[in-house]
Amino acid sequence: MSSTDGGKSLAKKKLSELTEDEKILKSELQVIVRRVFKQLAGIKTTRKKSGAEEPLPGPPRTGADPRVDESGILLLTPLFTEDVSHAENCKVFDKVADMAVEEINTSPSDLLLQLYPTIPFKRVLLYEFAKTTFRGYVTKYQAQNDPVKKGMEAANRKVARHTCRREDKKTWRLTAVRKFMVNYGFNPAPLLHLDWMSKEDSEPEGYAQCEMETEKTQVLAEWRKNLLHRLGITGDLGLHDDMGLLEVVQPEWRSEYALAVLHELSRIHYMDLTATERKNIRYKRIKKKQAGLTQNLR
């Protein structure tokens, strides 16, 4: 697979301007570029489930030995204190683009093979994605060295996760509206506002403020233990490390009537899923304890 025409525009287009196939292709290429960038820069993931990473390297000291990974491969150090035009960073972007092109040419995924003939792209597109990845890490680098920015970044990530999950839940319930109307004779769609969806937490309160990695691990383990116990799971909890857990916080101002309608929409959506789709649901949802009540939710 060789890179041909059309490239940079895909990186510059707004999301609303992309076709569905272009969105999929862009996402697939960004995943490849991010993985190669992390490999080349020696950025390691410390917790598989959450995707947490080790602290990012600072500027190399004068006269310091070159960095190599466990296989002896030479690593490059992006200068997160500089911008994308810095010569050293441009070297990194060039190398990332070259490695990504090599991976795409030698072992393309089935998805790329399917999309590439209709949406060709240039190497410059991968270079642009490397710059985008770098900018994301600049924010992380600034946060790890500034307690205020670190707290702001953690808060922004949490809000983004909450919004994404609310959008997913709204979308699922919208698919059940037609059948709901057949069953109950009225349209529940006016209740499907984003703010009316429950908040779903994948970590305990205060987790992001933990300073030490050992403290984070302990706090998260205790939170997961509590949720698993509320699901009736005891014994060796390590056997359930791959189980995704979400603690559901329902808006207290929602009426019982609205809650019943939303739950029925969720039930209809779930019943319409195939056996495979049900099996692929990533999370167990547990209602946050309120007045001693616990409820498992889909």
Image: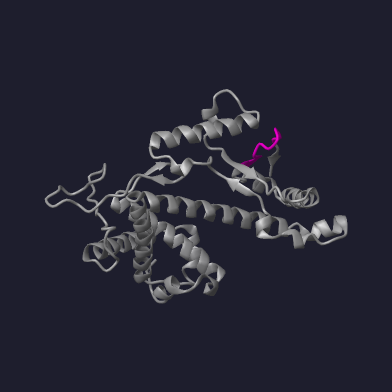
Residue visible at 39% across and 66% down in the picture: 1
Does 9 appear above or below 164?
below
Please tell me whether residue 45 is drawn above or below residue 181 in the rendered image. Answer: above
Estimate the x, y position of residue 179 in percent, counting from the top left.
Answer: 81, 57
Q: Residue at x 81, y 56 (%)?
A: 180
Quadrant of the frame with the C terminus: top right
Q: Which residues are magenta?
A: 284-294
Q: Nearer the viewer, residue 57 or 205?
A: 205
Q: Which residue is pictured at 71% across the width and 50% down the height?
A: 273
Quadrant of residue 244 in the image? top right
Quarter of the figure with residue 120: bottom left
Q: Position of residue 205 (x, y in %)?
A: 53, 41
Taking depth in this image into account, of 23 and 264 the one nearest to the observer is 264
Tell me: 225 left or right of 270.
left
Which residue is at the front of the view, 292 or 127?
Answer: 292
Q: Residue furthest right?
A: 185
